[in-house]
Amino acid sequence: MLRREADRQRGGYVDVPRRLDVVLVLVIMALSLADALLTLDHIERGGIEWNPAMRLLLDHGTGWFVSGKMAVTGVGMVFLLAHMHFRRTRILVVAVLGLYLALTAYHVSLLDEGVRQSEDAASANAALTRLDEDEHK
């Protein structure tokens, strides 16, 4: 049965998602996992989790944190995937992708900063060691 043009424009629920939409959702899920793992790395180096709900899960352990984050993201993405034919949903999914890309870039910048600080500390330690060796000669 053909749908009327007005129905097509208004949108509708998805029973079989398009391949591109599934790929988009899988990329978002992968970025969510990367966010969880990079957050754990950040916390190990003295950072904090900003999201109070995720912080609560983290208080119960890393397994709870990663599982909870992936569950929330997964449920949200399945909901959005089912509504993908609605115009605003597609815009929202692209916005979520953009936010996760920005968040991943932020985490990578923190990693880079940590590497630079480690290199600076190693250089300072090497200089102190050379000074100490020169004093003992």
Image (cartoon, helix red, strand yellow):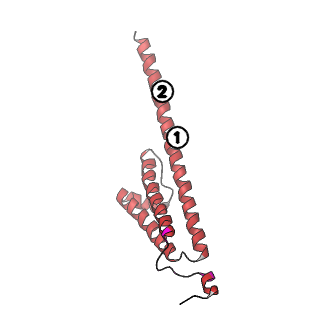
Point out the stretch of residues depicted in magenta: 9-19
Q: Seen from this angle, which residue lies furthest bottom?
A: 1
Which residue is painted at 47% across and 21% down in the image?
Answer: 127
56 and 25: which is toward the camera: 25
Q: Where does residue 107 sit, x and y in percent of width and height?
A: 51, 49
Is 62 magenta? The answer is no
Q: Where does residue 37 sit, x and y in percent of width and height?
A: 42, 53
Tell me: 11 left or right of 43.
Answer: right
Q: Is residue 47 above or below residue 126?
A: below
Give the quadrant of the C terminus.
top left
Which residue is painted at 50% across and 31% down in the image?
Answer: 120
Q: Is residue 95 above or below residue 119?
A: below
Q: Residue 113's mark?
A: 1
Which residue is painted at 47% across and 68% down in the image?
Answer: 22
Asked whether residue 61 appears in the rendered view, the answer is no
115 and 30: which is toward the camera: 30
Mark 1 lies on a secondary structure that is helix
**Earlier residue among tags 1 and 2:** 1
Mark 1 and mark 2: span between their CA atoms? 15 Å
For label 2, the residue is: 123
Q: Amino acid at mark 1?
A: Glu
Mark 2 lies on a secondary structure that is helix
Is 14 magenta? The answer is yes
Q: Seen from this angle, which residue lies furthest top?
A: 137
Q: Where does residue 33 sit, x and y in percent of width and height?
A: 43, 58
